[in-house]
Image (cartoon, helix red, strand yellow):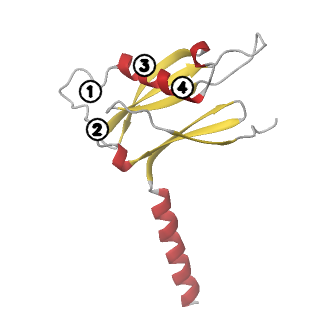
Amino acid sequence: MNRIAMLMLVLASLCGSALCQYSAEFSSYYSGKRYDFRIAQEQLVGPPWLDGEANPPLSARDAKEIAAVYLSDLFKNANAWRVSGIELFPLAQRWVYLISFDPPLRGCQDCISTPFKIVVLMDGLAVPAVKSRWNPPSP
């Protein structure tokens, strides 16, 4: 019985450290693929947005341009995508940008699509996506 309890404790601590590996994860979906933007704690070392400052260290316009360049690395038709939103998101005493893009409609007038969000850090780096296959749940 003690061995089982010890084994469970070891497994729980391993799982806990694996879960704490990232400070945050944002996911976007497009064309049967899932794109996970995982932010590790050590990536949040860029300039902070201090309470007394009117503007963040990286402007929204610069973050949008950085995200657009990264989008073109992901998709050949990135120039047909449109920015649909720019959001500041607080994360572990820092802030990140979530830049949302609407993909081009592919042959349908009433299609519903979700925005594709790219994460940009205050140091001007886009968080690289981890791409995987995604099968949407069927109704």
Q: Amino acid at mark 4?
A: Leu
At label 2, counting other C-alpha atoms closer than 10 Å, the crowd grade (few under 14, some 14-19, many 20 or more) is: some
Disc 3 crowd, CA 10 A, few/some/many (<14, 14-19, 20+): few
- Tell me the mark number nearer the camera, choosing from 3 and 2: 3
Q: Quadrant of the N terminus?
A: bottom right
Which residue is the extreme one toward the left? 52
Sequence-first tag of 3 and 2? 2
Q: Amino acid at mark 3?
A: Glu
In the image, what residue type sits under mark 1? Pro
Image quarter for residue 122?
Answer: top left
The disc, 4 or 1, on the residue closer to the chain's N-terminal end is 1
Q: Sequence-wise, which precedes: disc 4 or disc 3?
A: 3
Q: How far apart are labels 2 and 4 at the CA level?
A: 22 Å
Residue 46's disc is: 2
**Relative to residue 85, is residue 90 drawn left or right?**
left
Q: Secondary structure at mark 3?
A: helix
